[in-house]
Amino acid sequence: MANGGRPTPDELPAPAASNITPKALAGFRHELDQRKYDAVDGSWAGSVPAQYGVAPRIRIGRSKWFNLLWLLPIGFVLLIVSIAVAKGLRDVPAVAQFMEAYPGTVVPQGAEENAGFPAWVGWQHFFNMLLMIPIIRSGLTIIADHPRFYWTRHSTPGKDWFRVQKPVPADPLWTAKQDSITLPDSIGLPGRRHSIGLARWWHLGINTLWLLNGIVFYILVFATGHWLRLIPTSWEVFPNAVSVMIQYLSLDWPTDNSWVAYNSLQVLAYFITVFIAAPLAFITGLGMSPALSTKFKWISSIFSIQLARSLHFLVLVWFLLFIVMHVTLVVATDALHNFNMMYTNTNDADSWNGFWIFAISLVMMILLWVAVTPFTYRHPRAVQRIGYALIGPVQRLFEHLDSKPGQYTEKDISPYMWHNGKYPETPEYKDLYENNFADYRLQVSGLVEKPMELDLKQLRDLPYHEQITQHFCIQGWSGIAKWGGVSMQTIVDLVKPKPEAKWVIFYSFAEGPDGGIYYDAQPIEQMSYHLTMLAYDMNGDALPYGHGAPLRLRNEIQLGFKLVKWIKGIEFVEDFKDFGGGEGGYNNDHEFFGYRQSI
Ligand SMILES: Nc1nc2c(c(=O)[nH]1)N[C@H]1C(S)=C(S)[C@@H](COP(=O)(O)O)O[C@H]1N2
Ligand SMILES: [Mo]
């Protein structure tokens, strides 16, 4: 023996088979951005510059776009013409007879006994207004994050029917984040580009209160005779509504009898708002939830997320038109009397009492309007916490919906899938990519019996799992793809998590916009769901660079931002509090998203 009695490498026994290196055991926690972000300032979202949209446009036919600003002059001309026509009509004897037969108001039986407005109507009306302001404004911010509407779940560029943004550029790696636009801070809540995380806390959080207010309203409306005012009880409401319309347009307005009964146009407008638009807002809102859409396939196959989102938007348009008309008419017809009915619940035509209460409520609304965006920028964590307190329980509830595959087939696959996020740019990733991922190792570590490293061949040798599912980005776009790879259950069975493991962190090669690698924490139960998998194939080919090569997560009850692309490691942990900024994910740390996103 040479070497002073020590064996040469050739003489050594082969090392015991092991697929774990000390590096693998370490996880990637040290590569996370540990800073705490507690305010929204100039460095927001990786110092993303403001970018404004274009005037709203509607698609006509295949590719012609109509700028809606033209509706202003067109609407003005139409209004003038309608006024002239209405005035002319009233001179026609048949029309005059019609107007006499249908003066404009149907007084239902029992209306006289139920005349007047109880105090609860005034209060409900006030709360409703107060809540609608943040709901509508945050809704606009949500729209601004993907300023396009589609009729189908494919969200294909050029197939949008409405946009406030230029056409989608030809860049094949154009991301939805690049597509997002800024709103003025006085309009959006908040206005900044890509502040959807905060906007959603406002929107979903306040929605729970609005819903509660609405339920109380429904109960009281039906428990009292108040429903008689809002629900048409005879077909006469239609000719009467036409009559009222002619009276308004001919500028010879109907006599007001609101203390007893609304005129028929009011009844129809209020009925639609209370009993059609409001429930539709709720239903279409839920229609955008990934967990619900994936579970209730028979509904979502017709009522797709994009149909829901488009209808949700049209409901908003209705509300906006309603608010403008309603406020205009309240002020233009007998303002003092109207204020007294709603704010002091008296049938007093001359007192200023109602006006003053209205004025105070208006000041409150203006103060609220002005304060909410700056408050959100100063206290985003408070917005995140309060929002989560309000809507989090429902989001948690929906996380129990473990859906089976089979909702979609090959023919449902979207021709185009939007990209999102920040692409990996590190030398580490570039080297792997150029080598066709021959040196790629997925590192699975943390609270497991058997930490391991798996190369792509080993991953491909595991039982193959395939699913055709729909992706739901928080920004609002969607798309269907076929994903092939390994069920997360298979990985769980291999590594055997310890009982203490409660959360599973997925680490990316890619950094986030503020630096530090992208990551996301998911509850361990969901790793056993049917539709939770690591995908290395997409639509029958190897997963492309833009969509997360060589490996990405799919968990179909969650929104897209939780589905980490370019995965390099998975770590089983007890709690995510000590990882990164401690909020359970990159977007949660940096942009105040939530860690449960089933809605
Ligand atoms: N590493 C990493 N993964 C990520 C993101 C990211 O920014 N970085 N963005 C997420 C978001 S917001 C979405 S919607 C999906 C988009 O997946 P796709 O580009 O394959 O459509 O990836 C998610 N995974
Ligand atoms: Mo997303």
Image (cartoon, grey):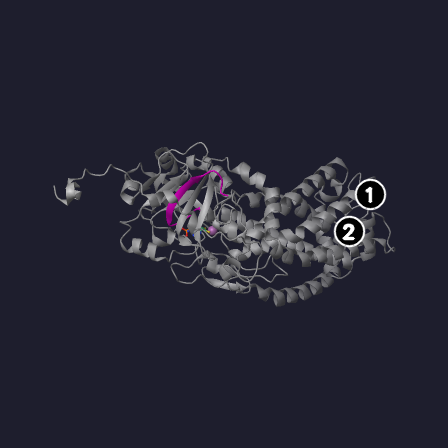
Residue 566: which numbered mark, if any?
none
Is 348 rendered above or below residue 275?
below
Q: Is residue 568 magenta?
A: yes
Nearest the viewer among 456 and 369 is 456
Q: Label 1 sits on what residue type?
A: Ala
Q: Position of residue 420 (x, y in %)?
A: 43, 54
Asked if the stretch drawn in magenta spans residue 80, the answer is no
Image mark count: 2
Side (left or right) of 396 relative to 339: left
Marks 2 and 1, Cα distance to the nearest angstrom? 20 Å
In the drawing, does residue 270 fall left or right of residue 449? right
Q: For ligand 2, tell me if the residue under mark 2 lies within 8 Å.
A: no
Q: Residue furthest front?
A: 4
Q: Residues within 10 Å of mark 2 (few under 14, many from 20)?
A: many
Residue corresponding to mark 2:
103
- Could you tell which of marks 2 and 1 lies nearer the N-terminus? 2
Magenta region: 563-576
Local secondary structure at mark 2: loop
Q: Nearer the viewer, residue 253 or 258?
A: 258
* x then y, percent, for residue 234: 72, 42
Mark 1 residue element: loop
Residue at x-position 77% and y-position 38%:
225
* Residue at the extreme top of the image, as rendered: 499
> The residue under label 2 is which amino acid type?
Pro
Q: Which residue is mark 1?
A: 115
In x, y percent, where is residue 329?
74, 57
- Does the image show residue 238? no
Image position of 234 (left or right of 276): right
Task: Work out which quarter of the rendered image holds the N terminus and state it.
Answer: top left
Residue 440 visible? The answer is yes
